[in-house]
Image (cartoon, coloured by chain):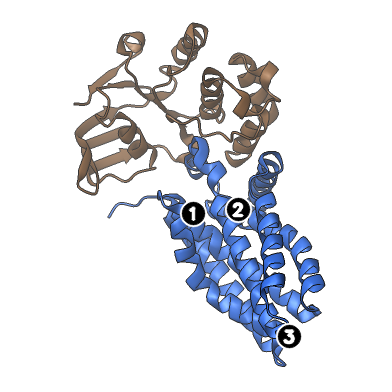
């Protein structure tokens, strides 16, 4: 599903990604690790099509409708409620039976009771849960997750473990993390950026 | 139909965010009213109406700039623009939704500003009001695109006027001409032509402003 060869990304003279090779078949689960500043976030932005590689070859066999992207930022409006945010993205992603899907995700991620509150009133962990709902909303075939455990409490992290465990093998994943052992059991490809 | 539904959903979202945050419209209203009040006392007695029409356009253009400077702030917070760009809908719908919402804010500011202008300065006939409406469309269409470009940089407030003001000059010429010229229809035609050309250009080029392409 993803094949990258000698990927490089520069911003001006600054090189943020150097010589990355990555091959993830459909249903594969790639775990990307590396120290801060090694280019993990940039790699996901390049794979998502949000940034263009400066050099190298890249094939991603998924269009925008099949791509779920969880970024460092939650990609939701602060002044809208969880329900309004998911409804907007559900429309833009043409999610069938949108209301049912949104309700199911909010229940599953423990946000149903807070569905009518503005995101600006959420804790960081709640916002991260909502960001996960947004990334999963359209049931994407390829999931690019940037530090998905960031800001989650233990209950949230276990919930995410279960979600990833249930989807692994059926969906293709590229996940960046500082907690590689947590995802070791799911990983089919492991990449360390220098 | 799907495209229009996307535009409607995006416009509705902007109006809802503004109704809750109240960041843009109150600032535009305050600016346009205070500018007109200051001009009222600053203009020497006996100054003709023609000068006053020019001042109206100073107030309108800078109130629009104020709105445009904040237009993409909700998308910058929490990185929402990336989320919108990744959605499979036509990306130009994002621009059109933003343009319509900004137009609504500018029109709302003018609902207060135009009567205030009539009260303080001079009457406005239907041609002059038509000129204002046509110029609003042009400034919001071009301004939303330029504001998206400027929002990517750190000096948004500095960059935006530099990008928008040169492009707004034909609108100011057309707007003032529609108010004072005996051949006001020609100026209205100029404004309509400007709106058509620049709206199509902005609509077609928005995707290239918000995405990176391989060289």
Q: Residues within 10 Å of mark 3 (few under 14, many from 20)?
A: few
Task: Look at the numbered disc 3 and give the secondary structure of its residue.
Answer: loop
Please give the name of the residue rendered at 65% of the width and 81% of the height, measured from the top-left corner.
B176
Chain that the image shows in brown: A
Q: Pointer 2 indicates a residue of which chain? A: B
Question: Image quadrant of residue A9?
Answer: top left
Q: Residues within 10 Å of mark 1 (few under 14, many from 20)?
A: many
Q: Could you tell me if residue B137 is visible in this image?
A: no
The answer to whether the residue labelled 2 contacts the one labelled 1, judged by CB atoms less than 8 Å apart, is yes
Where is the C terminus of chain A found, in terms of image quarters? top left
Residue at point 65%, 34% (across, down): A80
Q: Where is mark 3, residue-wise?
A: B46
Q: Secondary structure at mark 2?
A: helix
Whichever of callouts 2 and 1 sits on the residue coming sooner in the sequence is 2
- Picture coordinates of residue B96, whole percent (x, y): 60, 56
Against A133, residue A156 (above or below) is: above
Residue in view at x 69 percent, y 50 percent: B26
Tag 3 and tag 1, C-beta contact below 8 Å: no
Residue drawn at 60 percent across, 29 percent down: A120
Where's residue B200, x and y in %?
55, 68
User: Distance between the Cα atoms at labels 3 and 1?
Assistant: 43 Å
> Label 1: chain?
B
């Amino acid at each position: 599903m993803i094949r990258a060869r000698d990927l490089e990304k520069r911003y001006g003279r600054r090189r943020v990604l150097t010589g990355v090779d990555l091959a993830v078949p459909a249903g594969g689960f790639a775990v990307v690790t590396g120290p801060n500043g090694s280019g993990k976030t940039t790699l996901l932005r390049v794979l998502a099509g949000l940034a263009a590689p400066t050099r190298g070859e890249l094939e991603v066999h998924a269009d925008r409708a099949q791509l779920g992207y969880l970024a460092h930022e939650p990609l939701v409006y602060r002044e809208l409620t969880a329900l309004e945010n998911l409804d907007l993205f559900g429309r833009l992603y043409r999610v069938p039976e949108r209301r049912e899907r949104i309700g199911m995700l909010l229940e599953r991620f423990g946000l149903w009771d807070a569905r009518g509150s503005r995101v600006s009133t959420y804790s960081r962990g709640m916002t991260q849960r909502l960001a996960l709902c947004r990334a999963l909303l359209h049931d994407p075939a390829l999931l690019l997750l940037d530090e998905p455990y960031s800001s989650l409490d233990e209950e949230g992290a276990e919930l995410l473990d279960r979600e990833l465990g249930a989807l692994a093998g059926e969906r293709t994943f590229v996940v960046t993390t500082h907690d590689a052992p947590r995802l070791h059991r799911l990983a089919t490809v492991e990449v360390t950026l220098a | 139909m799907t495209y229009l539904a996307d535009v409607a959903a995006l416009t509705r979202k902007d109006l809802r965010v503004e109704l809750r945050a109240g960041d843009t419209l109150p600032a535009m209203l305050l600016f346009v009213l205070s500018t007109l009040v200051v001009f009222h006392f600053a203009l020497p007695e006996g100054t003709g109406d023609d000068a006053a029409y020019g001042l109206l356009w100073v107030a309108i253009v800078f109130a629009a700039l104020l709105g445009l400077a904040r237009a993409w702030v909700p998308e910058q917070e929490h990185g929402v623009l990336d989320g919108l760009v990744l959605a499979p809908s036509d990306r130009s719908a994002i621009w059109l939704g933003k343009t319509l919402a900004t137009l609504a804010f500018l029109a709302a500011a003018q609902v207060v500003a135009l009567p205030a202008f009539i009260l303080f300065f001079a009457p406005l006939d239907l041609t002059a009001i038509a000129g204002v409406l046509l110029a609003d469309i042009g400034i919001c269409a071009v301004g939303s695109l330029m504001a998206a470009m400027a929002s990517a940089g750190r000096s948004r407030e500095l960059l935006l006027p530099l990008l928008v003001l040169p492009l707004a000059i034909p609108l100011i010429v057309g707007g003032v001409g529609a108010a004072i010229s005996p051949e006001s229809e020609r100026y209205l035609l100029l404004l309509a032509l400007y709106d058509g050309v620049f709206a199509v250009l902005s609509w077609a080029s928005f995707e290239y402003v918000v995405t990176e392409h391989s060289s």
